[in-house]
Image (spheres, grey):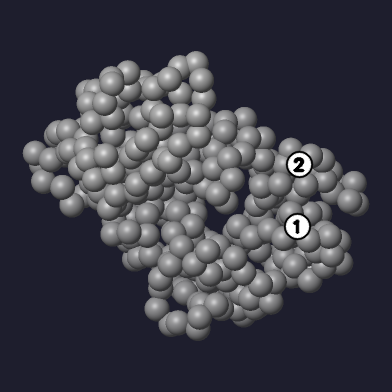
Amino acid sequence: MNHIKDQIRCGAAYRLGLTGKGIGVAVLDTGIFLHRDFDSRVTGFADMVNGKTFAYDDCGHGTHICGIIGGSGRMSGGRYSGIAPGCDIVMVKVLDRKGNGYSSDVLAGISWILERKEKLGIRILNISVGACSKRGMSENSALVKGVNRAWDAGLVVVVAAGNNGPRTMSITTPGISRKVITVGCSDDDREVLVGGNRMVDYSGRGPTAACICKPDLVAPGCSVVSCSSRADKYTIKSGTSICIFPEGTRGKTESELELGEFHNGSFKMATKTGCPIIPLSISGSREILEAHFPKIRGTHVTVTYGKPIIPGELTKEEKKEIGNYTKNILLEQLKENA
C-alpha cells in the first residue's frame, strides 16, 4: 500500500492533518470482516443478500476494499494502512460469496444509505459493482439512475470502471454515469488473474455510448496488499493468485522425487501478508517430453493440491524453515502418486 500512497501523493494530505477523520465512507460490496485495522470505525452494516444483522464477509473482496479505503495498518505497524486511515466505514452487503449480485440489491443498498447518510455522517459512496449487459449500458438504466440519485443527494460517488477492457466503450454500468467519478486501473499492463481468467490490459476504457470521456481517473490496482477476511491478516488482490516454483527452475533430475533447494525468499510474500500457501505437485509430466526428448507423447498427469499452509499457525522454527517445511509436504504428495 505504501508505494500506492506515494504515487497518489497521500503524504501531502497527511501533512495537512487530512486522514479522513470524521468522514463516513459507505461501501457497497460483499460485506466486511471486523479486522483490527478498522478499530471501532465500522459504524454501520446492512445485508441486502442474506438479511443478517451482524457484520461479516463470506467472500473477502469487501474487506479488502475497505482496508484500501480506511485500514489503519495497526496489525502491520502501519505498513498496510489505507488511503484515509481515520475515516468511518459503513458497509452494505449487496454481493454474495462469489462476488455476484442483483441490481435490485444494489439499488436497495443505495436507498438504505440515503436514508441514513445524515445520521451516520456519510459523505462518500464507493461501489465496486459493474454490469456489462447491453440493456444495462444505457444512461437510462436503473443502476445509473440510482448512482445519479446518490450524487444529487450530495454524496461523492466513486465507481469502478470494470474489467472488460481494453476495447473502447468497455466501461461497466454504473460507471458510465456522467455524474460519478469512475476509476480505472493504471497498472493493468501486468498480467493477473481476474475472475479466474488470466488477463492483461483489462481495465474498462471509454468513451461511453453517449461519448462521455471515461474513466475520470486511474490509480494502481494490481497486487494490492490489504485486509483479509481471515483473522487479522492481510491478503493480495487484483483478483490475483500467484503460482511460485520455489526451486527457481524446472527440475533437471531423473526422478520426480529428487527436488532441488527451496528458496525461502519465495515464501516471504505469504508470510508477510498471512496469505495461505497451497502445496501443488505435478506427477507424471516427465513422460510428456523429458523422458523421450524430442518426441512428445500423451500420458497421465496427476495434479495434487495439498491442505493450505497458514503461515500464522506455524511455529517460529517452521516459519524460519518454511521452504523445507513446504518441500517435505510436496515430497509426500509426490510419493503418494509415484
Question: Which residue position is annotated with label 1?
Answer: 132
- In terms of image quadrants, where is residue 156? bottom right
Which residue is drawn at the image coordinates 27% and 39% (left, top)?
338
Counting other residues with Cα less than 10 Å from the Cα at mark 2, is it few (<14), some (14-19), or many (20 or more)? many
The quarter in which the N terminus is drawn is top left
Q: Secondary structure at mark 1?
A: loop
Which numbered circle lies on residue 205? 2
Q: Identify whether 50 is placed above or below 239.
A: below
In-front residue for pair 291/225: 291
In-front residue for pair 94/202: 202
The image shows residue 260 at horizontal and vertical percentages of: 24, 23
Question: Mark 2 touching mark 1, by CB under 8 A?
Answer: no
Compare marks 2 and 1 and give the one earlier in the sequence: 1
The image shows residue 130 at horizontal and vertical percentages of: 68, 58
- Which numbered mark, 2 or 1, is in the foreground of this view? 1
Could you tell whether 116 is left or right of 335 in the image? right
Q: Amino acid at mark 2?
A: Arg
Which residue is drawn at the image coordinates 75% and 67% (left, top)?
143
